[in-house]
Image (tube, helix red, strand yellow):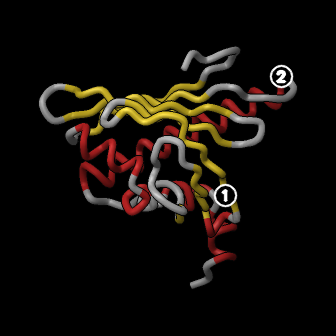
Amino acid sequence: MEPQGAPIVTAQMLIRKPVEKVFDAFINPAVTTLFWFSKSSGPLEAGREVLWEWEGLGASAVVRVQEIEPCLRILIEWDDPPCPVEWLFTPYEEQGTLVRISNWGFKGSADEVMTQALDAKGGFTMVLAGAKALLEHGIVLDLVGDQYPERVLRAFPA
């Protein structure tokens, strides 16, 4: 898909695991829930609509899967109006994968677009860092929840 308009936000990270394992982490909610959202209505499949939830944060997103090229690319749209997100998976050296996430199509005033773009850049950078920690070291960092601890602690008191 050819991005239209500006800005286009990108975040990327080298994950030192084979592309098959890294790709699966983003389409399989049993893995993705360990580093990003807390609940999903199902795996990502082309033509399918799934619901992602961040339970402790009281947030959710309807995700419409536009295209999947196994071990190469995922293209979704979320939000209303639709905002595309694309993942590209590139094998790197012998056992690594470079994951590049791009997001565009932000709507609103110049200030609103800038806020959305900055939020997307920060969010996708955290998602990639969480995926890297999990896949390379088996560590669940809970970066997304820990960004808003006051919300999570109220939702799930000790």
Give the crowd class for mark 1: few <14, some 14-19, many >=20 residues within 10 Å. Answer: some
Q: Residue at x 24, y 49 (%)?
A: 136
Q: Amino acid at mark 1?
A: Ser
Dot label at residue 43: none
Q: Residue at x 27, y 59 (%)?
A: 138
Q: Residue at x 48, y 34 (%)?
A: 67
Quadrant into which the N terminus falls:
top right
Q: Of residues 156 and 107, which is closer to you in this image?
A: 107
Query: Could you tell me which secondary element the residue under label 1 belongs to?
Result: strand
Viewed as shown, does residue 102 lie left or right of 15?
right
- 67 w.r.t. 126: above or below: above
Give the crowd class for mark 2: few <14, some 14-19, many >=20 residues within 10 Å. Answer: few
Q: Of residues 109 and 145, which is closer to you in this image?
A: 109
Q: Residue at x 21, y 42 (%)?
A: 17
Most distant residue in the bottom direction:
158
Viewed as shown, does residue 102 lie left or right of 61?
left
Q: Of residues 35 and 104, which is closer to you in this image?
A: 104
Disc 2 designates what residue? 110
Badges 1 and 2: C-beta atoms under 8 Å apart?
A: no
- 67 w.r.t. 61: above or below: above
Residue 11 % position (x, y): 48, 30
Query: Could you tell me which secondary element the residue under label 2 belongs to?
Result: helix
Most distant residue in the front direction:
47
Disc 1 designates what residue? 60
Quadrant into which the C terminus falls:
bottom right
- 23 w.r.t. 29: above or below: above
Residue 98 % position (x, y): 32, 29
Q: Tell me how far mark 1 sits from mark 2, CA to CA.
A: 25 Å
Q: Amino acid at mark 2?
A: Ala
